[in-house]
Image (cartoon, coloured by chain):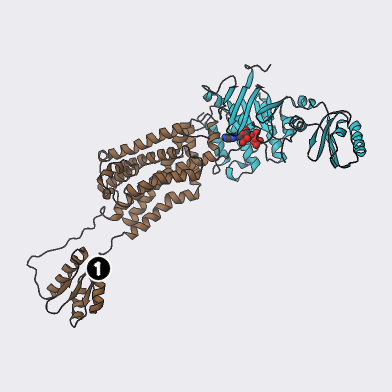
C-alpha cells in the first residue's frame, strides 16, 4: 500500500505537474504580474515635483525677470507677448502671469492651488532678489519614506489581485475543462472521494501560490525596494487564507458551468467589482461610507487590507484577524456549497 | 441459471427518457458471472445510456439494477472498488504521462495490479513516459482500458473499446479481454462490430430504440435466421415483389438498398432460381452477391435496417 500515495496527494501532485507543463498558464501566473508591477511602478515612480509653468509679459525688464524666476526650482517661466499671455493664462497653459514695471502685478486664478503656489514661489524669488532678508532662519527636510510611496501601496494590491485571478482561473478553468472532456465522469466512476478531488485543487493551488508570491516579492524588493515590514510568517498565512477564499470561489463558480465560455463570463462578473472596489490601484476610502461595510466584506478587500497592513504597517496577527476570518469564511462556505451543487458530468 | 443471486449484472424494466427520445425503453438483462456479454445496436440505440446506468453513472427513470447482487444506492463505495470501466469517450489528462495517469488511478483503489504490470499487459511500456496528448488513438484506447483494470475489478464495462482502431490494435484489445476473462472476470461491452461480438461474446443482446430485439449466443442468433446464406441482388428496373416471393428455399426477403435481400438455405438452388425469375420478368440483372449469414443479417432481418449506416 505504501507504494502509492493517498489519492489526495496523487491528485495534487498530478495537478501541479499539469500546471507546470502548461506554458501559457505559467506566463499568466508569474510573468504577467511582474510586467504589470514593472509598468505601474515606473509610471508612478518618484520624480522631482513638476515645475509650474508661468508667463512673463514681454517688456524691457522681462529678460531680467526670466533670469531671476528661473532660479526657483518650482517654476518654469517663459516670456509671452501681451496678447499671447492673455491666451495662455485663460487656457491654463500657465498658472500665473507676471507683469508690470515698478509694482509687480501677479495675475492668476486664486481657486487654482498651483496658481497660488506659483504666486508664492515667484514672489519669494523676486523679493529675495530685491534684497529681502528672512528674519527667521528655516531649513527644509524632505520625506521619501519607504512604505509611503505609491508603489508601496500598489504592490500588495497587485499581489492580492494576482492571488485572486490565478486562484479562480486555475481552479475554474481546470475543473470545467475536465468536465467537458468527461474526465470528471471518469474519475467519479472510481472509488475516488469527490472531496479529495476538490481539496486537491486547493492544495495544488498552494504549491504555485508559494512560487507566485515569492517571485513578485523578490522582484519588487530589488527593483523598487518594496519591503515587508511585518512578519513573513503572517504574510504567508494571509496568502494561504486568500488562496483558500479564491479556490473556494473558483470551485463554486465552476461547479455547474458546462463550457469554458460560461465559466469565463461568470469569473469576470465576480472579479470585476473586486478589481474596482477592493483597493487594488486606489484606496476604497473614496467610496461613500454607506458602501464601505460591503466593500470590506469582499474577499479581495480583506486580502488587500491584510497584505498592506503587514507589508507596510507591520501589523500583528491580532490586527489582521478580522480579514483572515472573512477570507476563510468565503473559502469554506463557497467550497461546501460548490461541492454540494457540483455537476460531475 | 440466470437468477438474480448468481448474476453479475441484472436489470429489469430499465427506462431512461430524454425530452425528445426514449433512450432506454424497458430493458431486461441478466448477465452471469464470468460471462462476456455484448450489447449490439446501431447509433443512438441506447447502448451507452444502458451501460452507464449499469455503471451507476446515470440514474434510470424507472427499473431496477443490481450489480454483484447490490443496488447502487447504499453500496456505491463498495461497487466502485469492484468494477472497472472505459467510457465511450474520455480524454484523460493530456499533459500527464501514461505512467502518471496509471499511478493516479491506481491510488484510488485498495488493491490491484501495478502500473508497470498493466503497461506490460497492454503493450504500453514503451510509451510509459509519453504524454497522453501525444498517444495514437489505439494507444489512448488501451490506456483507457488499463485505467479500467487498475483496481483489479470483478466486472469490466467497455463502451465501444475498439471503435476507430486498426485491426492490430483491435486484436490486442481482444487479447486483453480474453485474459481478463480467463481469471474469472465478467465483461459487458458494446460494439458496432459483428466480428468482434461474434469472437468475444458468449451472449449478445441486440438493442434498437432502447428495446431488446434479440438475445442469445452468436450461434443461436444466426440460427434464428433459419438460413445459412444471404443473397443480395439489384435489377433494372426493380424486380416485382411477386417474383421475389416465389423464389425457392428462402426464409424471407426484404427490400435492401436498390434491390432485394433474401435469406436462403441453399445457394445452389436459389441463385439459379433468382436468375430465372429475373429473365422471366424481363428486368435486367445489375449486381448479385452472396455471403454466409452473420449477426449483421440478424439485425437487418429484425429491423429492415443496417447496423452501421456507412
Ligand atoms: N444527456 C442526453 N440528453 C438528451 N438525449 C440524450 C442524452 N444522452 C443520450 N441521448 C439520446 O439518447 C439516445 C441514445 O443514446 P446513446 O448514447 O445511449 O446511444 P448509443 O447506442 O450509445 O449510440 P452510439 O453507438 O452512437 O454510441 C440518442 O438518441 C441520444 O441522442
Ligand atoms: Mg454509445
Could you tell me if residue B36 is visible in this image?
Answer: yes
| Image location (x, y in percent) of residue B187 | 65, 27
- Cβ of mark 1 under 8 Å from ligand 1: the answer is no
Q: Which of A228 and A121 is in front in this view?
A: A121
Q: Nearer the viewer, residue B257 or B111?
A: B257
Image quarter (top left, top right, bottom left or bottom right) of the C terminus of chain B: top right
Question: Dot 1 surroundings within 10 Å: few (below 14), some, or many (20 or more)?
Answer: some
The residue indicated by pointer 1 is A51
**Number of numbered markers:** 1
Q: Which residue lies furthest to the left in this view?
A: A135
The image shows residue A55 at horizontal and vertical percentages of 23, 74
Left or right of A117: which side holds A246?
right
Quadrant for the N terminus of chain B, please: top right
**Chain given the colour cyan:** B
Q: Give A86 or B109, whichever is nearer the viewer.
A: A86
Whether residue A276 sits left or right of residue A183 in the image: it is left
The location of residue B295, given as percent across then percent down, is 76, 31
Report the image quarter containing ligand 1: top right
Chain A as rendered: colour:
brown
Q: Can residue B113 be seen in this view?
A: no
> What residue is at 32 percent from the left and 47 percent from the top?
A277
Q: In this view, does A31 lie above or below B138?
A: below
Helix, strand or loop under label 1? loop
Q: Mark 1 lies on which chain?
A: A
Q: Pinpoint residue A186: horizontal percent, then vertical percent.
A: 55, 34
Q: In which quarter of the image is residue B179?
A: top right
In which quarter of the view is residue A195 placed? top left
- Foreground residue among A235 and A160: A160
Amino acid at each position: 500500500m505504501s507504494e502509492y500515495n493517498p489519492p489526495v496527494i496523487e491528485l495534487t501532485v498530478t495537478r501541479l505537474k499539469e500546471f507546470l507543463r502548461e506554458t501559457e498558464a505559467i506566463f499568466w501566473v508569474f510573468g504577467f504580474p511582474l510586467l504589470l508591477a514593472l509598468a505601474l511602478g515606473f509610471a508612478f515612480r518618484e520624480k522631482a515635483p513638476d515645475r509650474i509653468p508661468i508667463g512673463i509679459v514681454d517688456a524691457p525688464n522681462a529678460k531680467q525677470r526670466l533670469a531671476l524666476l528661473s532660479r526657483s526650482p518650482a517654476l518654469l517661466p517663459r516670456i509671452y507677448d501681451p496678447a499671447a499671455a492673455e491666451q495662455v493664462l485663460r487656457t491654463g497653459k500657465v498658472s500665473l502671469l507676471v507683469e508690470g514695471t515698478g509694482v509687480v502685478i501677479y495675475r492668476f486664478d486664486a481657486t487654482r492651488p498651483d496658481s497660488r503656489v506659483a504666486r508664492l514661489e515667484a514672489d519669494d524669488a523676486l523679493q529675495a532678489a530685491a534684497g529681502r532678508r528672512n528674519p527667521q532662519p528655516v531649513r527644509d527636510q524632505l520625506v521619501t519614506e519607504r512604505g509611503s510611496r505609491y508603489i508601496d501601496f500598489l504592490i500588495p494590491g497587485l499581489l492580492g489581485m494576482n492571488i485572486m485571478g490565478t486562484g479562480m482561473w486555475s481552479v475554474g478553468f481546470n475543473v470545467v475543462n475536465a468536465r467537458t472532456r468527461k474526465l470528471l465522469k471518469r474519475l467519479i466512476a472510481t472509488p475516488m472521494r469527490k472531496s479529495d478531488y476538490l481539496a486537491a485543487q486547493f492544495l495544488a493551488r498552494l504549491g504555485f501560490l508559494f512560487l507566485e508570491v515569492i517571485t513578485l516579492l523578490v522582484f519588487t524588493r530589488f527593483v523598487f525596494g518594496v519591503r515587508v515590514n511585518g512578519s513573513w510568517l503572517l504574510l504567508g498565512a494571509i496568502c494561504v487564507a486568500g488562496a483558500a477564499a479564491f479556490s473556494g470561489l473558483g470551485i463554486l463558480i465552476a461547479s455547474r458551468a458546462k463550457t469554458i465560455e460560461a465559466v469565463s463570463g461568470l469569473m469576470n462578473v465576480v472579479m470585476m467589482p473586486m478589481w474596482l472596489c477592493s483597493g487594488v490601484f486606489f484606496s476604497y476610502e473614496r467610496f461613500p461610507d454607506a458602501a464601505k461595510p460591503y466593500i470590506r466584506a469582499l474577499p479581495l478587500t480583506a486580502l488587500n487590507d491584510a497584505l498592506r497592513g503587514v507589508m507596510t504597517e507591520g501589523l500583528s496577527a491580532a490586527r489582521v484577524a478580522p480579514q483572515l476570518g472573512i477570507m476563510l469564511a468565503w473559502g469554506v462556505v463557497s467550497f461546501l456549497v460548490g461541492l454540494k451543487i457540483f455537476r460531475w458530468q | 441459471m440466470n437468477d438474480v443471486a448468481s448474476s453479475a449484472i441484472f436489470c429489469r424494466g430499465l427506462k431512461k427518457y430524454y425530452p425528445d427520445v426514449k433512450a432506454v425503453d424497458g430493458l431486461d438483462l441478466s448477465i452471469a458471472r464470468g460471462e462476456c456479454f455484448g450489447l449490439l445496436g446501431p447509433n443512438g440505440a441506447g447502448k451507452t445510456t444502458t451501460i452507464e446506468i449499469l455503471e451507476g453513472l446515470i440514474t434510470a427513470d424507472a427499473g431496477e439494477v443490481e450489480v454483484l447482487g447490490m443496488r447502487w444506492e447504499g453500496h456505491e463505495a463498495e461497487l466502485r472498488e469492484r468494477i472497472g470501466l472505459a467510457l465511450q469517450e474520455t480524454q484523460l489528462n493530456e499533459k500527464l504521462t501514461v505512467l502518471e495517469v496509471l499511478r493516479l488511478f491506481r491510488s484510488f483503489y485498495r488493491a490491484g495490479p501495478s502500473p508497470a504490470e498493466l503497461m506490460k499487459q497492454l503493450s504500453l511500456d514503451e510509451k510509459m513516459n509519453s504524454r497522453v496528448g501525444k498517444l495514437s488513438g489505439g494507444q489512448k484506447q488501451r490506456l483507457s482500458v488499463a485505467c479500467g483494470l487498475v483496481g483489479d475489478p470483478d466486472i469490466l464495462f467497455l463502451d465501444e473499446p475498439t471503435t476507430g482502431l486498426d485491426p492490430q490494435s483491435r486484436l490486442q484489445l481482444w487479447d486483453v479481454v480474453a485474459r481478463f476473462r480467463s481469471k474469472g472476470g465478467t465483461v459487458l461491452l458494446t460494439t458496432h462490430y459483428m466480428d468482434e461480438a461474434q469472437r468475444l461474446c458468449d451472449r449478445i443482446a441486440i438493442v434498437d430504440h432502447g428495446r431488446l430485439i434479440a438475445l442469445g449466443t452468436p450461434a443461436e442468433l444466426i440460427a434464428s435466421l433459419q438460413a445459412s446464406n444471404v443473397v443480395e441482388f439489384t435489377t433494372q428496373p426493380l424486380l416485382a415483389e411477386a417474383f421475389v416471393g416465389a423464389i425457392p428455399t428462402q426464409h424471407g426477403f426484404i427490400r435492401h438498398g436498390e434491390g432485394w435481400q433474401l435469406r436462403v438455405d441453399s445457394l445452389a438452388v436459389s441463385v439459379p432460381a433468382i436468375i430465372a425469375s429475373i429473365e422471366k420478368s424481363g428486368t435486367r440483372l445489375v449486381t448479385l452477391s452472396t455471403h454466409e449469414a452473420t449477426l449483421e443479417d440478424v439485425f437487418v432481418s429484425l429491423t429492415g435496417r443496417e447496423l452501421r449506416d456507412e
